[in-house]
Image (cartoon, helix red, strand yellow):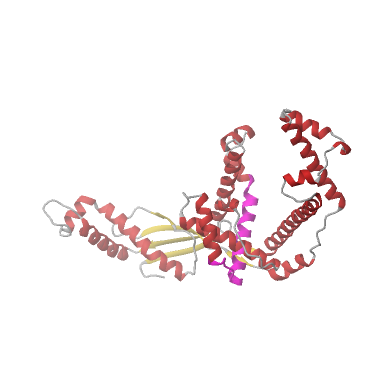
Amino acid sequence: MSKNLQDLKVSRDDKTWEAEIRATITPEAMERYKAAALKELQKTAKLDGFRVGMAPVDRIVQIYGDQAILKRAAEDAVQHELPELLAAENLMIVESPRVSLEAPVAGKPVAFTARAALAPEVQLPDYTKIAKAIMDAKEEVSVSDEEHAEATAHLRRERARIDRLEAGVEAQKAHEESRALKPEELPALDDEFVKTLGYESSEKFSETLRSNIKHEKEVQAREKRRATLLDSLVEQSSIRFPAVLREYELDDMEARMKSDLERMGTSLEGYLAQTKKTIDSVRAEWKDAADKRAKVRLILAEIARKENVQPPAKELDAEFAHAKQHYPEAEDGALRAHIAGVMRNEATLRLLEGDATPVQASAHDHAH
């Protein structure tokens, strides 16, 4: 411990994952820091009859006041002593410490308390083994004739609705009439019609439709596997993180909700009024989801660190340039860091899945 401090007490709050430091600055140290504070004030003080930097110390004390100088000395002492103290106690923090000082008294020790969020601690399970077990259980996706027929019927019904709209039928009535048609009454998806959609024949259209259905089912299956993988990793990892990360996730969830509501033509305030909720009550409902999001983010970041996963610079540059066109007001550093994080997480998931496909960040992720 520094000779400038005494009565040191260091504790960790496992619930909030914060460190608390209590100590006092010795009277001798306060005298030294007070002298240094006076010297700094003397350098910049502008007093009538004296050149800058040449005013006598007693005049500076008279103008600024002894108590204000003591307070500045105590603040300087904490600012200088805390980094060394944190290093000595092996405390890794992720924010500037929040410091409270008692009012200093000349010739007396000055007590202070500092609290700061600790860096997250992540202990991973055998993530490769977990991912392999999930991928080994992967089932081949296929499209049944029934699924193909159902999709075809839906498109034929849509064609019937469009035909009525083009004939001048009111939109709601066109919808109702097309829903009421029997299967045999639906218009055919013949060559003539599919050519208006850009296909050379109904056969080619049918093949493409089957392929699209299969792709959609593959995407859904992949998302389900990923959810299972992430749930397993969260369940089997040991993670401690500060409340500030939960607040970050809650802020992000609130921003997404606000954006989604605005796209639907309403507002967050309108939603809260309609549901008779407050934003605080909504955020409280989100707490568990926010904790899980924070854990997933930390898990993927730790796996990426261990596996040295980084988005390729060329692809990152391209994604950043694309996003900047859509969000020119965004701060460059924050936007680039966000896109890099999205791409890194996607690359990490693909690594676990054994997929080497190049990674791109989605436009929706850019927006948040």
Q: Which stretch did the figure color magenta?
A: 285-313
Please give the count of numbered marks on the rendered protein. 0
Principal secondary structure, stretch drawn in magenta: helix
Which residue lies at the image location 47% right of the left edge and 63% below the top edge? 9
Residue 46: x %, y % from top left: 18, 53
Toward the viewer: 264 or 297? 264
Seen as rendered, the residue at the extreme left is 49
The quadrant in which residue 219 appears is: bottom right
Q: At 16% across and 52% down in the image, what residue appears?
A: 47
Magenta stretch: includes residue 294:
yes
Q: Can residue 239 be seen?
A: no
Horizontal side, residue 276 vs residue 189: left or right: left
Of residues 348 and 286, the one nearer the viewer is 348
Note whether residue 76 is visible: yes
Residue at position x 51%, y 57% in the image: 321
Q: Nearer the viewer, residue 212 or 73?
A: 212
- The image shows residue 184 at horizontal and vertical percentages of 88, 38
Q: Position of residue 124 (x, y in %)?
A: 65, 68
Pick out the residue farthest to the right.
184
The answer to whether 276 is drawn above or below residue 293 in the figure is: above
199 relative to 337, above or below: above
Left/right placement of residue 76 relative to residue 14 reads: left
The verdict on residue 136 being magenta is: no
Q: Quadrant of residue 298?
A: bottom right
360 sits to left or right of 332: right
Q: Position of residue 218 (x, y in %)?
A: 75, 57
Image quadrant containing the N terminus: bottom left
The image shows residue 161, relative to residue 302, as above or below, that is: above
* Residue in the picture at 45% in, 69% down: 87
